[in-house]
Amino acid sequence: MTVSHIFINHKVVNCEVNMETYRREYAAELEKGNDGQPDKIKAPEYSQDDELFMTLVKTLSLSTTTKFQFDPKDEEIKAWYNRNCKKLKTKGITFPKDLGEMD
């Protein structure tokens, strides 16, 4: 789940840029020296110094729940595994009839 825009303090704030991702990409560009282009990295439009914004972010984070409903059948797992072994040209393992028997 992602958030794109938040209306706060009588203005719309675009939240599509993750601060941690921005910092990592910016640092990587700086490490390139003269070949780097840190100005080309899209910066967040929000400030982590804005107390109201950060309170909203923390509130959303603490009140969010996630439910994963992906429940593949044993045969689907085996087929996926075998396809990837073929693609990587590696020898796979032999599965027991019941995957629950595996460690």
Image (tube, rainbow, N blue to C red):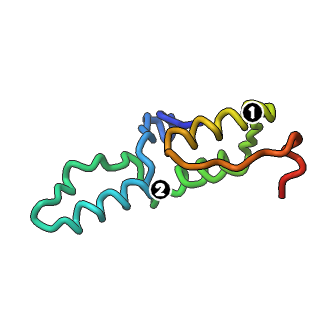
Q: Amino acid at mark 1?
A: Phe
Q: State the image quarter where residue 35 is shown.
A: bottom left
- Across and down, in percent, residue 24 comes to 37, 61
Residue at 45% across / 61% down in the picture?
49
Q: State the image quarter where residue 37 is shown.
A: bottom left
Residue 77, placed above or below residue 55? above
Indicate left or right for 12 with 70 as reference: left
- Across and down, in percent, residue 71 comes to 79, 33
Q: Quickly name the residue at label 2.
A: 50
Residue 92, placed above or below residue 16? below
Q: Tell me the quarter of the image containing the C terminus.
A: bottom right
| Circle nearer the N terminus (2, 1) | 2
Residue at 89% across / 50% down in the picture?
101
* Element type where label 2 sits in the image: loop
Residue at 84% across / 45% down in the picture?
96
Residue at 53% across / 36% down in the picture?
3
Indicate left or right for 57 with 43 as reference: right
The residue closer to the viewer here, 71 or 73, is 73
Residue 11, numbered circle: none
Q: Nearer the viewer, mark 2 or mark 1?
A: 1
- Across and down, in percent, residue 59 comes to 67, 49
The residue closer to the viewer here, 61 or 75, is 75
Q: Amino acid at mark 2?
A: Asp
- How packed mark 2 is, by other alpha carbons closer than 10 Å (few <14, some 14-19, many 20 or more), is few
- How packed mark 1 is, by other alpha carbons closer than 10 Å (few <14, some 14-19, many 20 or more), is few
Residue 70, numbered circle: 1
